[in-house]
Image (cartoon, helix red, strand yellow):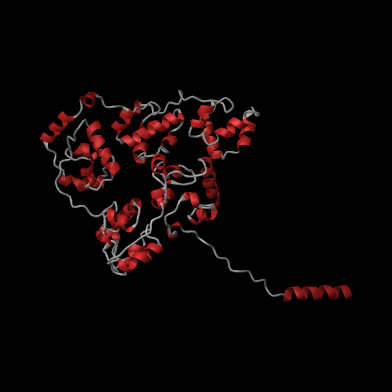
Amino acid sequence: MGMLVIILFGFQKYRSREKEVFPNVHFIVNNPATLKLSEFDPNDLDEKQWQNLGFTEKQTVTILNYKKIVGGKFLSREQFKKCFAVSEEKFSELEPYILLPENNREANMNGFAHFKKKSITVSRKFNPDFYAVTDWIKLGFSERQAEAIIKYKNYLGGSFVSKEKFKECFIINEENYQKLSSYLILPEKTPAGFNYYKNNSISGKTKIQYRPFDPNLLDTDGWKSLGFSDKQSQIIVNYRDRNLKGSFKNLEDIRKCFVISTEKFEELKPFIRLNQESIAARQNTVPPEIKQQEKTDFSKVDLNSITFRQLLEFGFDEKAAGSMIGFRKKLGGFMNKEQILTTYNIDIPLMEKLLSTAQLNTSNVIKYTLTEAPEEWLKSHPYFKYSADKIIFYRLSEKDEKKLWKLLKIKPEYEAKMKLYLK
C-alpha cells in the first residue's frame, strides 16, 4: 500500500509541473548587399576581418594559407584575384577598395607607398551629376572608385536623383557619405514616381539618340558610342575586318554578328547607311595577307592547336586570344573544354560558341606519374605548383601513389584537376 501511495504522489508531481519554456529562435541572415565597404590592405586583415567582408570561415582559412604560399604577402590585386576562394563576383565587389597595385610588375616598380588610404575632403557645395572621374579623384576617391560611381550614376539613368539614391551607391560608405552629404546639391528624398528602368535602355545605360551612320567607317569608339561595351566593340571590328575581310556588304552581314542582338539590330537598322564607295575603300585598305586568307572551318579546328590568328578571326580580341594561348601553353594542352572557360580575360559567350563548334584532341598532351613528374614541370604547372614542394618531399620516401595522395591531403576538386595530367 505504501509503495502505491509513493507512485501516485510522484505521478501527480509530474503532471503538475509547468510546461518547459523554450527560448525564441532567431535566424541571422548575412546579406552581402548590406556590407559597408571601405579601402583596405588585404595584408592587414585577420580571420575576423575577412569574415566581416562576407567570407566563410573555410574561405578565410584558404585565403590566409594562400597568402603564406605566395610569400606571406599579397603584392597586387592580380595576385589576390588568383586565390580560388575569391570568386569573380566577390573580387569585382572588393576591387575598388583594395589598396594594392594592379599587378606584380607595377608593385615591383612603384612599391606600395601611393596605395595608402586616402581621406575624402570637400570644401564647397556641388552637384554630383556634373562630376567626371577626375573630379571624384580630386575629392580623394581612387580611379576605380571614381569609375564605379560614374557607372552607378549611368545605371540610374544619368542622374543621382536624390541624396537617398546617392547614399545607396556601394562605393559610398557611411563615413564618406556623412562627409559629403551637406555639400550635395540634390533633393533629400527620391521622387515618389521615380523608376530608373524607365530612364534606361535594356543595357542599363542612358538612352542613346541615334543618327545615320556608315558601319564601315566606325572604329571601336564609334561602336561604343552606339551603346556597345569595349569588348563588344572590338569583336564587331574584328568580325568586320577579319571574318568579312574589311567591310559589311549588306544588312545581313551586320545582323549575323553575334554580339549584336536582334533587338539592338532592329534599333540600329533605320540608321544604317551602307555606302558602296566606303565598301570599296575598305577592301583596298585590308592587308594583302588577310585578303588571301581563306575563311577557317572551325568545325575542323583542334582547340589544342588553334592559332592566335584563328582566334582573332573567330572574333576574340588580342588580349583574350593571348590569354587562351598562354594558359594552354602553361597547362601543356587542354584536357577538357571546361578548362578553357576558366581562362582569364576570355569572352564567355563567344568561347562557348567556339567550344560548341571546334574539336578537342588530347592525344598529344604530355602526362606523368606523380612519382616521376619532373620537378620543373611540377613547379610551373598551374594545377601542381602550389603542391609541388610537398610532392617532391613526400615522394622521396613514398613510392605508392595512393599513399602519396593521402599524405598530400589535397581537396578532391583539386586532386581531380591534377589527375587530368597524370598517367
Residue 275: quadrant of the picture: top left
Residue that lies at the very extreme toward the left in this rendered image: 277
Quarter of the image that includes the C terminus:
top right
266 in relation to 422, above or below: below
Q: Nearer the viewer, residue 384 or 1?
A: 384
Image quadrant containing the N terminus: bottom right
Q: Where is residue 170, by image quadrant?
A: bottom left
Residue 189's x, y, as percent?
32, 69
Q: Nearer the viewer, residue 91 or 268?
A: 91
Residue 131 left/right relative to 329 = left
Query: Residue drawn at (53%, 47%), measured in percent from left and top?
Result: 64
The residue at 13%/42% (across/down) is 273
Report the side of 245 relative to 44 (left or right).
left
- Where is residue 309? Give x, y as percent: 30, 28
The spot of residue 402 in percent (x, y) is 63, 31
Q: Residue 146 at x, y = what percent?
A: 32, 54
Q: Is residue 353 visible?
A: no
Q: Is residue 378 above or below residue 116?
A: above
Q: Nearer the viewer, residue 118 or 392?
A: 118
Q: Residue at x 23, y 54 (%)?
A: 207
